[in-house]
Amino acid sequence: MGFEKDKNLPGKYKTSSAGGFCLLETCLPDRQGYYFTETDYSPRPKAMNRLEQLLNFLKEDPNDAFTLYAIATEYQKTDTAQALAYYQKLLIQHPGYVPTYYHAAKLHAELGNHAEAERTFKKGLEVSLAANNRHAHRELQAAHQQFLDELEE
């Protein structure tokens, strides 16, 4: 990848691939994550991804339910075993954190852990009712019914 002087904009350079620009005084990153100067270019440090940021937040506050939940949800995209571990940690350490039950039960169902999915749905229904969280309760009821319907098929 190289860069060339922009004939229409004196003092600016553009990449040959992504169209990033660089003022001689101030370099701006292009879409590929490179800074450009008059003589060379080098990769800039990559920005932290969402999971790395969440893991750093967890280091600052290891008992934060929302951070644990967000990490589990992020891991669900790439590593279901890790996601399940974080959901289990939440269910043990924060049994009143209602959103966990829906996602943990759905993940158990997807993985074929039907008995655990059933237990998690039922416990989530109890906890959401006790917390007077009607919206979550309805969502759990619908997901639980869908789970049961799929088992019958």
Image (cartoon, grey):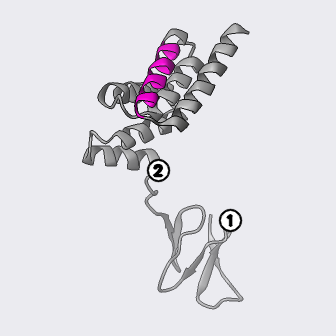
Does the stretch in magenta take in 126? yes
Report the front residue among 129 and 146. 129
Q: CA distance from mark 1 to mark 2?
A: 24 Å
The image quarter containing residue 5 is: bottom right
Instruction: Residue 105: say if magenta.
Output: no
Residue 86, horizontal then vertical, whole percent: 39, 30
Q: Residue at x 51, y 30 (%)?
A: 103
Label 1 close to label 2 by CB (< 8 Å): no
The image quadrant that residue 111 belongs to is top right
The x, y position of residue 9, in whole percent, is: 66, 89
Name the residue type under label 2: Asn
Circle 1 residues within 10 Å: few <14, some 14–19, many ≥20: few
The foreground one among 143 and 10 is 143
Residue 135 lies, in percent from the top left, at 54, 38
The kind of residue tagged 1 is Ser
Principal secondary structure, stretch drawn in magenta: helix
Task: Write the residue at 46% across / 50% down.
Answer: 49
Residue depicted at 71% across the width and 89% down the height: 8
Is tag 1's residue or tag 2's residue first in the polypeptide sequence? 1
Indicate the quadrant containing the N terminus: top left, top right, bottom left or bottom right.
Answer: bottom right
Q: Which residues are magenta?
A: 116-131
Q: Residues within 10 Å of mark 2 (few under 14, many from 20)?
A: few
**The C terminus lies in quadrant:** top right
Q: Residue furthest bottom?
A: 10
Query: Circle 1 is placed at which residue position?
Result: 17
- Name the residue tied to disc 2: 49
The correct choice, above or below, for 7 with respect to 149 in the image is below
